[in-house]
Structures are given as C-alpha cells and as structure tokens.
Image: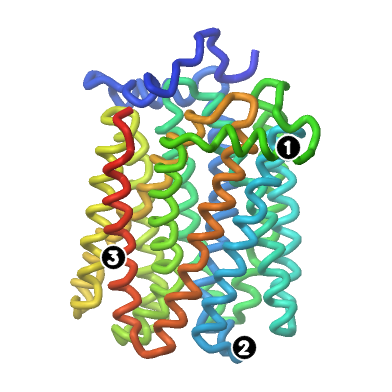
Amino acid sequence: MLPGSTGESDPSPSVRYVRTSGTDSLRAIAHDLWKDGRGWILLGVAGGWFLSLGVRLVFPALLPYVREAFSLDLTAAGLLLTVLWVAYALGQFPGGIIGDRLGEGNALVLSTVVSGSMIAALAVSNSALALFATTALFGFSTALFGPARFTILSSVYDRRDGTAIGLTLAAGEAGNTILPVVAGVLAAAVSWRLGFGVTVPLFFCMALVIWRVVPGRTTGATSAVDTLSIETLRYVVRGIAERTILIVTGVHVFLFFVYQGFTGFYPTYLVEVKGLAPSVAAGLFGAFFAVGVLVQPIAGAGGDRFGTRPTLLVVIAVATIALATLPFVDGFVGIVLVTAVASALLGVTPLTQTFLVNALPDDMKGSGLGLLRTGQIALGATGPLIVGAVADAGYFDGAFLGLAAVSAAGIALCLLVPAD
C-alpha cells in the first residue's frame, strides 16, 4: 500500500479545511504526519524544497556582488530577478504535466539534478549574457519541483495536508534563512561564485535522497495529460475556470507580487536607504525567513482549523501594516521588529496553494496547479523589475509603500473568498 493510503474515502474540499479539533496535541499531529512511512516522504520533499527555494533567494543576497561584477544598475538587477522568476513561472505547467505523466517523485528528482547542473554553470559565468541565460535555465528547472510537491503531500496526507504543506514551505524558509547568509559570508571572504557553487554538491546528494524515499508516483495513474494536445490544454483550462479557484488565484497573484518585490530588494534597500552594512542586511534578510519557519506551519494549521478566508485575512493584514510602516522606521531595533512582523507575508502560500490543490479535479491536479502557478508567478515576478525601476528613479521608499498598497488590495479580494 502506498504510504498515506488509509483506505478512507477522500473528503470533499468543503470538508477538508476544518479538521483539527481543540483536543489535538502536537504529539498526535506528529504521529499522523510520520505514521505508515509518510514521514520519510515529507522529509524528502521538504529537503528538496529547502535547496530549491533557498538557492533562489541566494540571488538577492549576492545581488550587490553580482551588480559590481557585471556592472548592472538597479533596473538591470531587478530584471535579472524577474528573469529568474518568470522562468520559474513558465516551468510550472510543464512541471505539472511531467508530474502527471511520469510521476510526481520522478519530477522532483529531475528538477533537483538539472537545478544543480545549472547552478554549476552559473557559478562560472563570465558575461552578462551567460549570467542571464543560466539564471533563466535554473529558474525553469526549479519549477519542475513546484506543482509536484503540493500534489504529493495532498495525496499522501488526507487529513493533515495543510500542516504538511506548511512544514514543507517552512523548510524552504529555513533554506532562505541559512543559504543566503552562508553565501554572503563566502562572497565576502572569497567570491560570489563560491557562494553559488557551494550548493552544487548539495543538489546532487538531495536528488539521491528523493529518489530513495519518495515514490515515483503518489497519485492514481489516470491523468488528463496522457496525450499533449490543444484539447488537453482546453480541458485543463476548463478545470481551473471556476470562480472560487480564480478568486484565490487572484489573491495569490497580489501577494506574490508583493513578496517578489520585497524579497528581491530588501537587502539592497537596507544598505542604500537605511544605511546598514551589507553583512547586517544579509543577516536581517535571513531573519525574515527564520521567522517564516514558524509562520508557515502555523498558517497551514490555522487554515486546517479555522478555514482559509479568516486565516488569510489575518496574515495579509499583518503583512500590510509592516510594509506600510517600514519606510518610517529608523534604528536597528525598529527595523528588526518590522522585519519580523513582515514575515507574515510568508503565511499566504500554504493557505492559497492547499486550497487550490484540493479544489482541482483529481485527474489534473498537477497540470491544473501548474497552469495556475504559471500565471500567478509570471505576474508576480514583475515585482522586482518595477521596484528596481522606481528605486532607480529615486523613490525607494515609495516602492515599498506601493507594495503595501498592493497587499491591501489583496485583502479586499480576499473578502470574496467563500467560507470553507
């Protein structure tokens, strides 16, 4: 029997969101997550996401060094980050198809191997063209990891998928906490190339771990993408063109734009506007994600217990207040506090993505989520380019206030999300 298959019927999406009771203990939750061999699957998926996301956030941390090495202004630097995330967006739908056709676990292995290869090529880039090309290929390869991790956990955990997804995303935030700081130290001491290159062997080791502990396929063999055709695309589009799915997708687009704009330039903003040393800025950048390690599983568990809409409203409101306050805060202690509160922004993804993967038809969960994420991430990825252009025009503070306004728009749209 596949780990996680309990023989129970899969509850409908309307039921699955309110499933933890007040008597649940941490021990009971841990037992549910680990039993029947599912804990190893969770560890494999979470470990791969630790690298996949963590290395993507190495880019903002090393951006001052990369700008100097390749003579990039802020707009060009923002374009580099936008290329990274647009490529990640474009790979979501193919990643979902690969997961549906070849198996979700196989998609994770392929993504991890190719990602390590692309980082190796990026670390030896000697021209701006090579830098942008390898960045794009790395972003695309990490996208193959995107939809599969959600469908794996949703299929393996029929009671605690929100919590499992929150923990996996928290592992990504741990990667964001550790890897950018390590890369920054190596860049300052040796070279920015080593800051990237040190992760290459980790990718190949992680690919071996995933191949060993994650089943090649965790969902049924029936798939809407057994053949690639225009009709297949039309079928997937019809599957996602449901009002509730589109509303939650819209909320994610607003907040992902904010996330990309904020994380893409936060270290640079702290250096150029707040006057902090680059090493201190890198440490605060890591602290933002360190708090996210707690925020994401708490948000996922909150969605399981209280429902998506109320939990989303709280998370987005807290993040909006922090973003609106940041330009007016001076002093190290104040910046630390605002950084910690702003990490509420990281609680959005476990809520929206768990909702969407449960709402999609069973035979197209991977490809449907992949197509949705292509749109979500492609639109959100314009954040760094816009923030960089506004900052180049001399309005760095204004760029962050603009992000707060977009976040507030996400709150308004969130009010349309139906009760679970």
Q: Residue at x 55, y 17 (%)?
A: 36
Q: Which image quarter: residue 136?
A: bottom right
Give the total number of marks visible in the rendering: 3
Q: CA distance from mark 3 to mark 1?
A: 41 Å
Which percent across, then down, holds residue 414? 31, 45
Quadrant holding the N terminus: top right
Q: CA distance from mark 2 to mark 1?
A: 37 Å
Left/right of residue 303 with respect to residue 237 in the rendered view: left
> CB of mark 3 within 8 Å of CB of mark 1?
no
- Closer to the eye: label 3 or 2: 3
> CB of mark 2 within 8 Å of CB of mark 1?
no
When the figure is inspected, residue 310 is found, relative to residue 362, above or below; the finding is below
Residue assigned mark 1 = 106
Circle 1: element type: helix
When the figure is inspected, residue 414 is found, relative to residue 60, above or below; the finding is above
Determine the residue located farthest toward the top in the rendered image: 7
Going by the numbered disc 1, the residue's amino acid type is Asn
Left/right of residue 119 with respect to residue 400 in the rendered view: right
Q: Residue at x 48, y 60 (%)?
A: 380
Circle 3: element type: helix
Left/right of residue 252 with respect to residue 5 in the rendered view: left
Q: Which mark is residue 405?
A: 3
Q: Mark 3: give few (<14), some (14-19) or many (20+) Cα within 10 Å.
A: some
Q: Which image quarter: residue 82?
A: bottom right
Q: Which mark is residue 69?
A: 2
When the figure is inspected, residue 304 is found, relative to residue 342, above or below; the finding is above
Which percent across, then down, holds residue 260? 45, 64
Circle 2: element type: helix
- Closer to the eye: label 3 or 1: 3
Q: Mark 1: give few (<14), some (14-19) or many (20+) Cα within 10 Å.
A: many
Going by the numbered disc 3, the residue's amino acid type is Ala
